[in-house]
Amino acid sequence: MKKNDILLLFGSLCFIVVAWIGFNIYHNIVTSTIPQFIVTQLKSINGSFNTTIINKLKTKENVSPSFSQGNLTPTVTQTQPASSTPPPPTPTIQIATDSAKEATGGGAL
């Protein structure tokens, strides 16, 4: 092959590759992946927040359970400032150990 033939082949190949990439980019921009029935259901989000609810959530008690076998009492942490009154008693959780040990029979198919 001559030098001009190789240059013509290389130039044509480059043109086809650039055109292919360009058409793919155009196709991805024009087409949408969201179905039309979902687009009609989309609503904008209101940008205002209810600050009183957020402040009430900040003063809420956080209960974190203890996952050890020996201690079944959850740990209660309060986010409110300490007051002069004593804290309320810690709630206890009782687990029925007899029913937890029994296994149920499997169903017959």
Image (cartoon, rainbow, N blue to C red):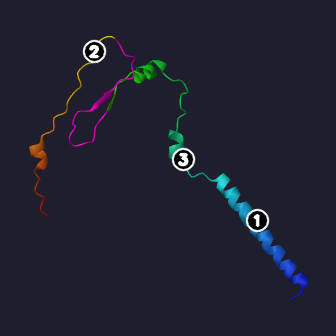
Residue 86, label in figure: 2
The residue that label 3 is drawn on is 36
Density class for disc 1 (Cα within 10 Å; few <14, some 14-19, many ≥20) is: few
The residue that label 1 is drawn on is 19
User: Which is nearer the eye, 49 or 8?
Assistant: 49
Identify the residue at image location x=29%, y=36%.
Answer: 65
Where is residue 22, by image quadrant? Answer: bottom right
Q: Label 1 is placed on what type of residue?
A: Ala
Where is residue 16, by image quadrant? Answer: bottom right
Q: Secondary structure at mark 1?
A: helix
Residue 92 on image: x %, y %: 20, 30
26 above or below 60? Answer: below
Sequence-first tag of 2 and 1: 1
Left/right placement of residue 2 relative to residue 93 reads right
Identify the residue at image location x=39%, y=21%.
Answer: 59
Density class for disc 3 (Cα within 10 Å; few <14, some 14-19, many ≥20) is: few
Task: Using the numbered discs, state the Cα–Cα distance from disc 3 to disc 2 in whole angstroms.
Answer: 60 Å
Q: Label 3 is placed on what type of residue?
A: Gln
Sequence-first tag of 3 and 2: 3
Residue 59, label in figure: none
> In what quadrant of the picture does the C terminus appear?
bottom left
